[in-house]
Amino acid sequence: MALKLSTVKRFSAHLCGNFIAATAALFCAGTLSAAAFEADANYVVTLRGVNIAQVSVDFDNNGQSYAVNIDGLVSGLASLVAAGTADLNSNGKVGANGLQSEQFTLATKANNETFKVKFQAQNSNVTSFQVTPELTDNVNRVEVTSGHRKGINDPVAAFLIKADSLSPAICNRSMDIYTGIERFDIDMSFAENQTATSQRTGYQGPVVLCKLRYKPISGHFSDSASTTYMKNNQRFLMWFAPLKNTGYAIPYRVLIGTAFGDLSMVLTRVSVK
């Protein structure tokens, strides 16, 4: 989702599909139990406090497999100067350590242009991928090798974290992400425990704050100012909260400092059944 197709491509990679999906709801003290569930939620995306997009999320999990569908739509003042949508879909297996993608799709539409990325994977290794329209050759684009497509997860599944409790262990991990066009790592570290209190959000209660660092591996442009900015960005934060008693911790808020001000995505509504 972006103002131009070129921005859409970079936005999807640099924000970790960064309409990374999910929701948060009432905190249940003690151990969380894993079970089949369906959840849907809405997020608002703001830039410097101004609404620029709306995001809706559907998350289905039967304990053995999962499906996540995310729809993003440019809105607010941004819709006066541009129109665009972004649809992300992640499907795969539910393992002991969390979700593992077997198919990921990103489709964007902006300014009468469409762009689609799709890949399939088995045992964390990409078996096929497709980009439409094909990317043009560029000497400054770092090549994605076959080795870079092994041991990966997609930018949606990686951030829906299986967790027995709301603890620092949610943050202390490294994620190997592949978007279909770019391969990068996200290193997370625990910052502090906090409490979400705003009545304007879809959740009030304990949250855990994580610091994130973006490490480009391949698929990015070596001369890209945005890549360099994200690599050095010290203001990349994500708050996690439990999704009721489902046994998952998921993003409650994402905040990324940009040259234009803070970009933020916050939960506004959630339902679990």
Image (tube, rainbow, N blue to C red):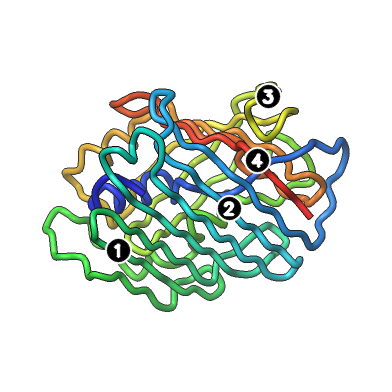
Mark with earlier residue (3, 1): 1
Q: Amino acid at mark 1?
A: Phe
Mark number displayed over residue 252:
none
Q: Residues within 10 Å of mark 4 (few under 14, many from 20)?
A: some
Residue at image position (20%, 43%) is 224
Task: Locate residue 110: give its quadrant.
Answer: bottom left
Mark with earlier residue (3, 2): 2
Judge by depth and name the residue closer to the eye, 228 or 267: 267
Mark with earlier residue (4, 3): 3
Q: Position of residue 221 (x, y in %)?
A: 21, 50
Q: What kind of element bears circle 2?
A: strand
Label 3 vs label 2: CA separation? 21 Å
Given this view, does label 1 or label 4 mark the residue nearer the observer?
4
Mark with earlier residue (1, 2): 2
Label 3 vs label 1: CA separation? 37 Å
Label 2 vs label 4: CA separation? 10 Å
Mark with earlier residue (1, 4): 1
Residue at image position (55%, 50%) is 56
What residue is shown with label 2?
Answer: 57
Mark with earlier residue (2, 4): 2
Left/right placement of residue 51 relative to residue 169 reads: left
What residue is shown with label 3?
Answer: 199
What residue is shown with label 4?
Answer: 269
Q: Quadrant of the C terminus?
A: bottom right
Judge by depth and name the residue closer to the eye, 228 or 25: 25
Which residue in the rendered view is the most extreme toward the left?
139
Q: Position of residue 218 (x, y in %)?
A: 30, 55
Asked if the residue at tag 1 contacts the one at tag 3, i.e. Cβ–Cβ closer than 8 Å, the answer is: no
Left/right placement of residue 29 relative to residue 142 reads: right
Q: Position of residue 248 (x, y in %)?
A: 72, 49
What residue is shown with label 1?
Answer: 115
